[in-house]
Image: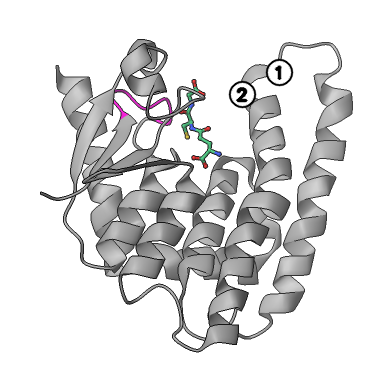
């Protein structure tokens, strides 16, 4: 039996592949592991059956035999450790790739999500215009640092790894903000990730869910 992941029945990103099931789909595609998807509604995510899998009532989850996981980072790390292709074999390089996963989730994603939330939900607030430049600058600081570290390299530390997969999916959340355009080398890095065949397959799979939901 292939593992089963959960994803939005109707994704608020309208098929742009920014929901976090995209990371798990991409990782599964990179390691060549088939998978099933169980689509869940917002209401179902808050019901006991889903809460037993995910204490915070969110997607994605991952079930494989008697293992159930939540948190996209934990799921991608699990896949990268169990299958070849997403982590280097050499021990120190492997630890560095994992450090980049944490950096993506813990250093880059918080200010990026904060900005995204402000753009989505706070535009009507009296303080929105005053707060926005501060949120944008917090993201710019990280993009500048990332750009300096990337330099001329294709990937963050040698060959493509789970660290890059996580970083690219986090950075893609900036697509609508225009901030990536200010850092062409970071934008090119994201585009390199998006050009990988495994990314395309994962993207198309989640887009097909959105298209099917739109037709029904
Ligand atoms: N840290 C979690 C975040 C999960 C998360 O925020 N999932 C979103 C979709 S991308 C969700 O389920 N949102 C609906 C909700 O929170 O009710 C992870 O990386 O898996």
- Residue 209 numbered tag: none
* Image position of 202 (left or right of 109): left
132 vs 206: above or below: above
- Depth check: give the residue in front, 97 or 1: 1
Secondary structure of the residue carrying tag 1 is: loop
134 vs 46: above or below: below
How far from the left and from the top, in percent, is residue 45? 38, 19
Residue carrying label 1: 123
* Image position of 163 (left or right of 39): right
Q: How many marks?
A: 2
- Depth check: give the residue in front, 169 or 207: 169
How far from the left and from the top, in percent, is residue 70? 44, 39
* Label 2 near ligand 1 (CB < 8 Å): no
For the record, the magenta segment spans 8-13
What whole-number distance in Å separates the C-alpha atoms at marks 1 and 2? 7 Å
Q: Residue at x 43, y 38 (%)?
A: 19
Q: Are marks 1 and 2 in contact (CB under 8 Å)?
A: yes
Does residue 10 show up magenta in the picture?
yes
| Observer able to see residue 88 | yes
- Say few, some or many: other residues with alpha carbon within 10 Å of mark 1 (under 14 / 14 to 19 / 20 or more): few
Residue carrying label 2: 120
Secondary structure of the residue carrying tag 2 is: helix
């Amino acid at each position: 039996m292939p593992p089963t992941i959960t994803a939005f029945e109707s994704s608020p990103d309208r098929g742009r592949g920014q929901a976090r099931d995209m990371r798990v789909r991409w990782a599964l595609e990179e390691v060549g592991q088939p998978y099933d998807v169980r689509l869940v509604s917002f209401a179902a995510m808050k019901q006991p059956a889903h809460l037993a899998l995910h204490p915070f009532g969110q997607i994605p989850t991952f079930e494989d035999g008697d293992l159930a996981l939540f948190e996209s980072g934990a799921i991608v790390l699990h896949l990268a450790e169990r299958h070849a292709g997403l982590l280097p074999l050499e021990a120190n390089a492997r630890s560095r790739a994992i450090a980049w996963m944490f950096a993506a989730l813990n250093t880059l994603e918080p200010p990026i999500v904060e900005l995204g939330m402000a753009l989505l939900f706070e535009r009507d607030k009296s303080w929105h215009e005053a707060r926005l430049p501060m949120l944008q600058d917090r993201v710019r600081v990280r993009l500048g640092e990332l750009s300096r570290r990337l330099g001329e390299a294709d990937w963050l530390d040698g060959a493509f790894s789970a660290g890059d997969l996580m970083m690219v999916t986090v950075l893609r959340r900036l697509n609508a903000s225009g901030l990536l355009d200010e850092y062409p080398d970071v934008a090119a890095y994201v585009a390199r990730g998006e050009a990988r065949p495994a990314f395309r397959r994962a993207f198309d799979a989640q887009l097909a869910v959105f298209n099917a939901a739109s037709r029904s």
